[in-house]
Image (spheres, rainbow, N blue to C red):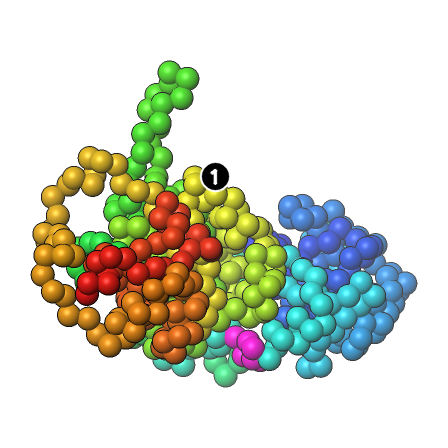
Amino acid sequence: MKKSEIRELIEQGEGYFVEFKKDIGQGLDREMVAFANSSGGKIVIGVADNGNVIGCILDNSVRSRVQDIANNCDSRILISLHTAKYERKDLLIISVEESRDKPVRCSKGFFLREGPNSQKLSRNEILALAAVAGKFKFDMQGSRTFNYPDEFEETKWRQFLERSGISSSGSRENLLINLGLAEDRAGYRLTNAGVLLFGENIEHHIRHSFVTCVLYRGITKTKILDRKDFKSDLLSNYQDAFRFLQQHLRLEYIIEDGGPRKEVSEISLEVLREALLNAIVHRDYYEEGAGIIVEIYDDRVEITDPGRLLFDKNKFGKLSVARNPVIFDIFHRLGLTERIGSGIGRMREVMAAQGLEIEFDPGDFFIVTLGRPEATSKEAEAPQVTPQVTPYATPQALSDVELKILQFCEAARSRSEIITFTKMNPDYIRKEILPKLIQKGFLGLTIPDKPRSPYQKYVLTEAGKKS
């Protein structure tokens, strides 16, 4: 490898395709296996995790030991070895090919690359991931329609380099390839990740990459107060959607120990960031029929993204697997994504500390529901856009489905029981029908002070009996 290529490799730092190791001691087999089970990559021996070049011993015994480690994995890992001098110190670069016979394991087990880390999985988990995710990852596919460099956003690229601490002294084209943002197979072109992150006119190439944010009056979709559609690059979409949430959620003011007044969001900003980032980074971009939807109701915030979990839901919150590894890696370099598996647990802890409910619905569309605290009396007395009507005032037309649900709920029923009974789309029942019947006063909650409780049930009210 050329000296300039080595410099670029070291300056970009560790990531999805690059791992630094001080020597070939413990853990080299794990890193090889993780790369082979993912998309391949390079292991640079003689460089510390922080990028400091310390050098390594280069002799035939070292090369032989590295090759033995690769050969002893099951199945055998294909590697190539390159030596180089950098800052007058010897380095060994191990290029690991993506395996065609996954899953690969070493004596320590099965591993998979996740951003700049390698995490351990069981054989069945690896196989299940391969079956669900498929061989081809959307963000790593080359874009056939994007015109590079004419549509490339140079300003955003430079901002990324500065924020991530990556030097811009080398070739931009080589760095884009090293980061998985471009390829040079049948001509140089950006990958879909490169387009989503640094492209102009992104919707012309990937129409479904938008984020739609909506503010409603009440707890149903009936009255829209504000709506914004964000169709820029992924980082800008995240920032714009986050500002929308900040703009429309209430602030609380806290004074501790006589100090200055502190503004605190009614839902933790940390939780909102994590939920929004998860939607953008982990959504299924092969699903062209929908974008990411952020909805604010009086009693909750819902963030919906297309794509089922890539693993058994029993592992949710314990296992983290990136559907879009290059996008995940870029957001990690920007300091936005959490370490493996920590985000969901932290969200639950923070919401519990605020006394708020949080719910994850891992269906065909992954939905995060964040409960909002009840408005203060002052907020509750604020002028309404439309007058509220007492349920007894006038007869209200109900659909056949709504009438059947009311009859079914003469005895208290859980939401899952109602969905099973109606045999209708769960999202429609959960988001449209039940909130509507509650708002009209026809259904009541058995645990009214905790509307998001997993033990919640719905029961017919006196008003509902007269409907």
Residue 124, position as x, y percentages in the image: 69, 73
Query: Which residue lies at the image location 43% right of the left edge and 49% below the top edge?
Result: 357
* Rendered image quadrant of residue 114: bottom right
**Quarter of the figure that contains the C terminus:** bottom left
Residue 428, position as x, y percentages in the image: 32, 71
Query: Which residue lies at the image location 71% right of the left edge and 81% below the top edge?
Result: 101
Query: Which residue lies at the image location 31% right of the left edge and 70% below the top edge?
Result: 407
Q: Nearest the camera: 258 or 77?
A: 258
Magenta: main secondary structure equals loop
State which region is magenta. Answer: 132-137
Q: Relative to residue 286, is residue 360 depicted above or below?
A: above
* Rendered image quadrant of residue 134: bottom right
Residue 370, position as x, y percentages in the image: 39, 52
Query: Which residue lies at the image location 39% right of the left edge and 50% below the top edge?
Result: 447
The answer to whether residue 201 of the structure is visible from this angle is: no
Dot 1 falls on a residue whose secondary structure is helix
Task: Give the crowd class for mark 1: few <14, some 14-19, many >=20 residues within 10 Å.
Answer: few
- Is residue 135 rendered magenta in the image? yes
Residue named by callout 1: 353
Q: Residue furthest right?
A: 61
The amino acid beneath tag 1 is Ala
Q: Nearest the camera: 4 or 322?
A: 322
The answer to whether residue 186 of the structure is visible from this angle is: yes
Q: Residue furthest bottom?
A: 186
Drawn side of residue 275 relative to residue 339, left or right: left
Residue 256, position as x, y percentages in the image: 40, 21
**Quarter of the figure that contains the N terminus:** bottom right
Drawn side of residue 92 relative to residue 361, left or right: right
Drawn side of residue 80 relative to residue 230, left or right: right
